[in-house]
Image: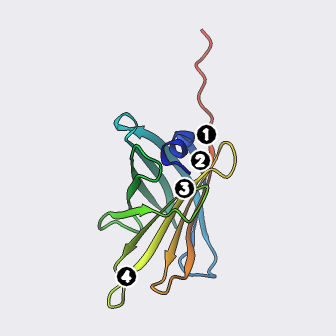
Amino acid sequence: MEAREGIAALVGEWRGTNKLILEPGAPAAESAATASVSVAGTGSSAVVRYTWAEGKKPQDGVLVLRLGAEPGDWDLVWTDSFHMNQGFMACRPDATKGGALSALGSYPAPPGPDWGWRIELHSPAEDEMQLLMFNITPGGEESLAVEADFTRAAIPQPAPA
């Protein structure tokens, strides 16, 4: 998916459900979620803000995408209050996931090697958005860590005059 085109289709407000999976095979912890997608810098960047909860504790996060002029020329940085509250993760495009904006990053896991992290953002149907995050072992095995499914929020209509 071309990044500018993909983001343009997602601009707006979203409501849905977040599922947090802390270990492969463990039950998902569900919470209500919101998201907002906007374009900034006269189209050269985009911001995805999202909220959810872990237990009763509110959480939030931000993806900031740099949108280059050419297809495939984009990247993103990510931070959130649960996974990355100590910094930013820089991610590069992952061209292997057709139909989604997919990006790969990594994080340290001392005393062993770094682990990978993949973020996918896509629209499975009109007025639907999905944010997926995967943990990737040093051996390359992926496991779903976050699944946030959204539907487009109703756009408020002006009151009749």
- Identified at 41% across, 67% down, the residue is 82
CA distance separating discs 4 and 3:
23 Å
Mark 3: which amino acid?
A: Leu
Circle 1 — which element?
A: loop
Mark 2 or mark 4, whichever is nearer to me: 4
Q: Which residue is mark 3?
A: 121
CA distance separating discs 2 and 1:
6 Å
The percent position of residue 50, horizontal first and vertical second, equals 48, 52
Q: Which residue is mark 4?
A: 114
CA distance separating discs 3 and 2:
15 Å
First reached walking from the N terminus: tag 2 or tag 1: 2
Q: Which residue is mark 1?
A: 153
First reached walking from the N terminus: tag 1 or tag 4: 4
Tell me the quadrant of the picture where the C terminus can be found. top right
Q: Which residue is mark 2?
A: 15
Circle 2 — which element?
A: strand
First reached walking from the N terminus: tag 3 or tag 2: 2
* Tally of numbered tags: 4
Mark 2: which amino acid?
A: Arg
Do the residues under discs 2 and 4 have CB atoms within 8 angstroms?
no
Decide: is 159 above or below 85: above
Residue count near mark 3 (Cα–Cα under 10 Å), binned few <14, some 14–19, many ≥20: many
| Left-right relation of 62 to 111 | right
Mark 1: which amino acid?
A: Ala
| Left-right relation of 41 to 97 | left
First reached walking from the N terminus: tag 2 or tag 4: 2
